[in-house]
Image (cartoon, rainbow, N blue to C red):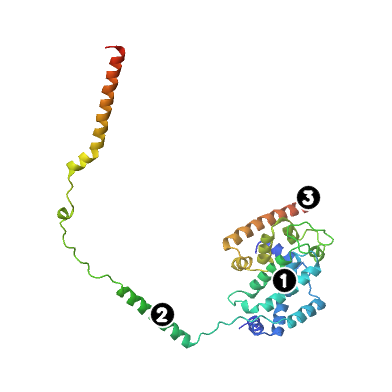
Amino acid sequence: MDKLAKQLRTDAEQIDVTVSDELEQRINASLRAVEPMEQMPRAAKPPLFWWASTLTGVAAAIAVIVIVNWQVPDEPVSPTPVNFVAAVPTIDLNAETAMLTGPLQEELDKLQSDLKKAEEKVKRDIGL
Amino acid sequence: MTDESKLIVAAKAGSAEAFCDLAELYRERLLRFLLTRCASFADAEDALQDTLIAAFRYIHSYDSRWRFSTWLYRIAIRNAAKLRGPDVMEVGELRDEENDPLQQCIADSETENLWVSARRTLTDEVFTAMWLRYAEDMSVNDISTTLDRSVSWTKVNLMRGRRALETQMNSAADQSEAYG
C-alpha cells in the first residue's frame, strides 16, 4: 500500500462515526414494519398450453402449404400463330391522300382566281 | 456458506431480524460515507435509514453474484442523489466549517484530513470512486458496477483523483516543513 492509500485509509478511520442507540432502534423498528416486496413469480405455463401452441403452429404451416400449392398457375398454353397480315384490313392510301388534300386544293384555286380578278381590276383602274 | 450469505438468504425469505443483523455489519460504514454528502448529521442518519429500508424492501432483486456491499452502496448513492436538494450537498460545494458534519466528526489535527480536501477538489463521482477504493477497499470492478461506469472510466478517474490528492498532500507537507 503506498503512502497516499495509507493516508486515505487512516483519515477515513479518523472520521469518528457511531450509530446511536436511538438511531439503531429507529432503523430496526422501521425494518420490522417493512414488508419486503415479493418477486413476481413467472406464471408456469400448463403442458396443455404447450400442446395447443404446437398444434396451432403445425396447422398454420399446413394451411400455408395447401394455399401455396393451390394457387400454382396451369401449364402455359402455347399460342396458335396468327396471320397478322391477313387480319389487318388494307387501306387505299391514294384515296385517303386525295380525301385529305382535296379541300386544300379547292381553297388554293379560289385564292388564285381572287388574285387574278384583283390584278385585272388594278390594270383597269390605272388604264393599262 | 458464510454468515453474511446465511443472513441474506433468511432476509430474502422475509426475516426482518436477519436483515437487522445484516444491516448492523454495514451501517457505520454507510453512515460515514453518507456523512460526506449530507448537510447535517441528522440528514445522514435519515439517508442511512432510507437506504436500509429500500435494501430490505428490494432484497429479492439482490443477485448473489455481486458483493452485498456493492449492492448496498449502489442503493445508498441512488438514495443520496434522490435526496439531493437543500439538505444534501454536492461534494465540491463549500461548507461552513463549524456546521460541516464531516469536520465535526474528525478529531483536531495539524494537517487537514485528506477526505475533506478530496471533497473540496474532486467531483462527486470521483470522490465516491476514491472513497470506495481507499476507505472501503473495493475492487475496481466493484466500483465500476456500483457507479454504473465502465472499468476504464473508473481506472482513469481513480488515477486523476490520486494525482489531485497527491498534489494536495505534498503541498500540505511542504507547508508544514516551511513553518517548522
Q: Quadrant of residue B30?
A: bottom right
Q: Quadrant of residue A100?
A: top left
Q: Measuring 36% from the left and 76% from the top, which residue is drawn there?
A: A64
Quarter of the image where the N terminus of chain A is located: bottom right
Q: Residues within 10 Å of mark 1 (few under 14, many from 20)?
A: many
Quarter of the image where the C terminus of chain A is located: top left
A81 left or right, relative to B147: left
Task: In the displayed orientation, state which residue is furthest to the right.
Answer: B98
Which residue lies under the disc numbered 2? A57
* Residue A43, label in figure: none
Q: Position of residue A18 (x, y in %)?
A: 79, 73
- Eyeballing the image, is B30 above or below B15? above
Which residue lies under the disc numbered 3? B178
Q: In front of the other: label 2 or label 3?
A: 2
Q: Quadrant of residue B64?
A: bottom right
Mark 2 and mark 3: Cα distance apart in space? 86 Å
Contact (CB < 8 A) between labels 1 and 2?
A: no
Q: Measuring 47% from the left and 88% from the top, which residue is drawn there?
A: A48
Mark 1 and mark 3: Cα distance apart in space? 38 Å
SS under mark 2? helix
Q: Of label 1 and label 3, which has the lower sequence position? A: 1
Q: Position of residue A67 (x, y in %)?
A: 34, 75
Q: Position of residue A14 (x, y in %)?
A: 77, 67
Which residue lies under the disc numbered 1? B30
Contact (CB < 8 A) between labels 2 and 3?
A: no
